[in-house]
Image: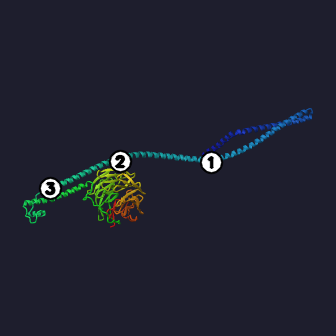
Amino acid sequence: MAERRADCSWKRHISDQLKLRDRVQRHTFEEIVQQYNRLLEKSDLQAVLTERYQIEKYDVQRGHEASSLDASRSDSLHQEMSQMRIRHQEELTELHKKRGELAQTVIELNNQIQQKDREIQSNEARMLEYQQQIASLEGDCRDLRNSLQELEMANQTLKDEYDALQITFSALEEKLRKTSEDNQELVSRWMAEKALEANRLNAENEKDTRRRQAKLQKDLADAAKEPLPIEQDDDIEVLAEDGGKGAGETSPNRPISRTASRKTSQQPQGGLLDSISNIFGRRRSANSFGTSPETTEPPSGGCAEVRVPTTALHVFEAHDGEVNTVRFSPGSRLLATGGMDRRVKLWEVVAGRCEAKGALTGSNAGITSIDFDSAGSYLLAASNDFASRIWTMDDYRLRHTLTGHSGKVLSARFLLDNARIVSGSYDRTLKLWDLRSKVCMKTVFAGSSCNDIVCTEQCVMSGHFDKKVRFWDIRAESIVREMELLGRVTSLDLNHDRSELLTCSRDDVLKIIDLRSNAIRQTFSAQGFKCGADWTRVTFSPDGSYVAGGSADGALYVWNVLTGKLDRTLDRNHSSAINSVSWSPSGTYVASVEKGSRAILWSDM
């Protein structure tokens, strides 16, 4: 059907083109046709006249023969006929000339017609080709229209689904906002309740302490008032102990001896009261920030020898879930671990084993960082509930909760004066806290999430998600300088004299930065070592001669700082990526924790 329509269409097109050519070229050939028709008429007229003249000639000849009288008349007629013949001959010549011109014109026009016919044939061939192309394009157009309709239908379906999802998303977002507000309100109320509960517990403990002290003082006072039977031998002993008289002095009478005995018996009781008062006074002093020789853990001095770990002394389950951080106390006697179970657990290191000593509670989310003050009296922990907390180590009581960040607190450290701490958060800020007033003194916007912090006397160094290590002046609240590494910074650590900074980044490289020259002094890497998380912690040895770090494959790597080479790899005990490593200040032990629930104590024993 389509082919028949195509045949009719091109025939009709040719007919229209011929009619158009006839209308265009008719005016050009019309004059030629008229001249040609006139020429034919004149030719016919000449033939008729010639025939008539021949007849008249024959008649004249016959008449001339018949009659001589008509000779003159015949001559005149002959002359007239000669003139007419000449005139006709001239007209005939002119007509032949015009006929030749017209014939030439007809030839030229025929040539033009033939050329036009060839052009028409060429155009018809091209028209046929174009029609085929048009048919093919029309088919493609139909296919594209069908595809377009299908795409429009699919687009409309997707648009409807998108609108529905957008509505659902808006509803869920509003629900999330309300839930977040409710959660924030509940957390605030919970924190307030816990603070009130902590205050009540502290008040009750203080009351109980005072009550026990008063009762003890009363009991001691009552005991001191009771008369004691004193014999003569006792009097002699008391006088001899008193030392107030010579050996050959006469003994006093009995009342005097009784009075001296009572005074002598009261003196130790008074000393006992003083000792008990000192005990309670020491407990009271532990409730305020300051160090006491009786309650603080004696910090270890410079280690005599650093032991490079070779053996897993104790492998134990530290937490219910992932263990994020580990830290030795300044005296190397206690090991603290923090995990996603919201607890800080304390372990006593005894003869190469870790024995559970207690747990610090109060956090509402996983623990991300642990730090001790320089005396080991207080423990600072950062957590994912946007807060940092401080516990006292003698009674494991929560003393302070520092809130103010709007994101996870990923690191918190004591400053060297132990009266201030600095915290870094996922909300891209650093905060300086005064522990005496329990308020935030300064907030500095860092521009990127802070993963770890270390401190010197007047400088805070922070490692960030944007691959930069920033150096802050505490007094000026400004960046002194910054250094960009090749990967996200996960960990920072200082050596024993705080002159070198150890960094770990997600490009699986550890670097030592000389803080005096602000230059990279040493770079450590190893085949197989891979940083497992944005909070993977590495550590210096106490004397700064080794660095240790855990890999994503569960292996512990130890590098020699002097040679810059890998010293050893311990890879048989952890079953998942190592999150944190800590070297004891005594240099004897290394502790590592993993994404599983396991912790390992290492040494060369």
> What is the spatial separation of the Cα atoms under label 2 and label 3, in whole angstroms?
59 Å
**Given contact means CB atoms under 8 Å apart, are the residues at marks 1 and 3 in contact?**
no
In this figure, which residue is indicated by the disc labeled 2?
A: 180
Amino acid type of the residue that numbered disc 2 sits on in the rendered structure:
Ser
> Could you tell me which residue is drawn at 73 percent across and 44 percent down?
108
Amino acid type of the residue that numbered disc 3 sits on in the rendered structure:
Ala
Secondary element at tag 1: helix
In this figure, which residue is indicated by the disc labeled 3?
A: 221
Q: Is residue 509 visible?
A: no
Would you place residue 247 above or below residue 117 in this image? Answer: below
> Could you tell me which residue is drawn at 90 percent across and 35 percent down?
62
- Residue 61 x/y as whole percent: 90, 36
Which residue of the protein is positioned furthest toward the bottom in this rendering? 605
> What is the spatial separation of the Cα atoms under label 1 and label 2, in whole angstroms?
71 Å
Residue 326 sits in quarter: bottom left
- Mark 1 or mark 3, earlier in chain: 1
Secondary element at tag 3: helix
- Residue 27 x/y as whole percent: 70, 38
Secondary element at tag 2: helix
Amino acid type of the residue that numbered disc 1 sits on in the rendered structure:
Glu
